[in-house]
Image (cartoon, coloured by chain):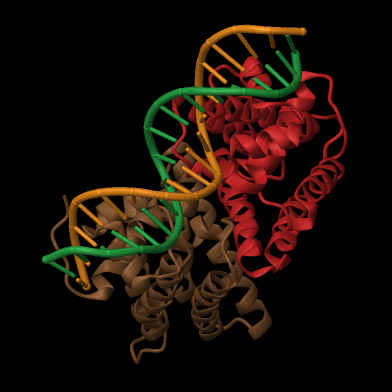
Chain colours: A brown, B red, C orange, D green
DNA sequence: GTCTATAATAGGATAGAC
DNA sequence: GTCTATCCTATTATAGAC
């Protein structure tokens, strides 16, 4: 029994949680209805396109979240080390120390339409771009910085999968440490 | 329209493909029936436990596949460099150069029961164990070799996710190269 | 904007003939 | 072992009142 909600962003946040935990096919309208506290018809009022459009909104929100907690922090005026620490703290909190899954990973392999796929691409692109900028600051040439960023995001996604499979959060923690080592 | 099949292993191989491509929730009995060429009732004859038991069988087969193409090769008598190359070739073929997804990753975040979860753990454990042994041979102390193996498998899983999201196979290719560099 | 009610269909699973 | 036929529930989606 979730508390009643007000804004559309709050609705999307609840949808976010359901898609993150259960994936696209695993998230039923009943789940989404219960999580938001809205009846199915109300959900269709906000998202006439159904689940697909809800996933799209969630992915747009994911990009906004990445922009706020990673991209903007990465561009901030503080020393590299400080910015890296802030990002690591935010990620560790967001992924609950590596125990939570990632909505991007969950939706990446789902059978979603072109608009949602575009949102997915964009989210990863922003994320990887920010990490690449940080890697560049640490002294890597551009191409290597970009490869580092892609590989690091991949490693993080895989660490969440390994945790889901085995319960081990060590790979996630080491991935966080590896990012911080950009400032070493 | 799949060709008719004979052995149980062949049936499981078809199920494997469906779970790999669509995930657990995305794979319907209709999909599984069509892929195997068996009616739903015939599938239930082989797997009285339904989808859950089919996934279990697929995961057991995944472990067998890992044992044959990774674990046994890793323990072989050839030079380290040769064994690494063989494993990389097998993985590149199996994952279609990074364009295919991994059934382990697909099932890791699904709501599957305890027996299937156990199969999943086992598959990853065998895989990671073999990579850790190779890393140990390359000169890493045991703890570091194990961390390398976990991180490398995570990186590979994440590379497949990034590919699914963006279409880019570069992270997968770099992961393959990184494994081969154990012999450098 | 939200609800109750209701389609309409797909999904997982079973019965029983062959 | 496989099939056809069937069941029941969950699922997506819509209609129409408030």
Closest to the observer, B107 or B147:
B107
Q: Residue at x 58, y 67 (%)?
A: A113
**Eyeballing the image, is A166 above or below A47?**
above
Residue B55's quadrant in the figure? top right
Location of residue A111 with respect to B72 vertically, above or below: below
Residue A145 x/y as whole percent: 61, 78
Q: How far from the left and from the top, in percent, is residue A117? A: 57, 70
Whether residue A52 can be seen here: yes
Near-viewer residue (B140 or B38): B38
Count all numbered tags in the image, as a single digit.
0
* Left or right of residue A96: residue B38: right
Question: Residue B84 at x, y = what percent?
Answer: 80, 45
A43 lies left or right of B66 = left
Residue B87 falls in which quadrant of the image? top right
Left or right of D15, for residue A148: right
Is B172 displayed left or right of A18 in the figure?
A: right
Residue A98 visible here: no
Q: Residue furthest bottom?
A: A77
- Residue at 33% x, 79% y is A82
Residue drawn where x is 25% and y is 52% of the image: A34
Q: Residue at x 68, y 41 (%)?
A: B18
Asked if residue A133 is positioned above or below residue B95 in the image, the reply reads below
Q: Position of residue B136 (x, y in %)?
A: 66, 40
Vertical order, B133 against B184 (above or below): above
């Amino acid at each position: 029994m979730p508390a009643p909600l007000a804004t559309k962003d709050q609705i999307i946040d609840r949808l976010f949680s359901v898609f993150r935990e259960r994936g696209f096919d695993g998230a039923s309208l009943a789940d989404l209805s219960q999580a938001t506290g809205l009846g199915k018809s109300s959900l269709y009022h906000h998202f006439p396109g159904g689940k697909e459009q809800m996933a799209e909104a969630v992915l747009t929100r994911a990009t906004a979240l990445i922009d706020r907690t990673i991209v903007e922090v990465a561009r901030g005026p503080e020393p590299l080390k400080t910015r890296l620490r802030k990002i690591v703290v935010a990620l560790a909190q967001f992924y609950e120390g590596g125990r939570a899954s990632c909505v991007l990973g969950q939706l990446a392999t789902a059978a979603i339409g072109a608009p949602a796929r575009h949102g997915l691409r964009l989210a990863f692109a922003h994320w990887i771009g920010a990490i690449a900028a940080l890697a560049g600051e640490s002294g890597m040439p551009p191409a290597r910085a970009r490869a580092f960023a892609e590989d690091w995001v991949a490693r993080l996604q895989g660490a969440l999968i390994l945790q889901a499979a085995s319960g081990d959060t060590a790979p996630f923690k080491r991935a966080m440490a590896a990012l911080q080592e950009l400032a070493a």
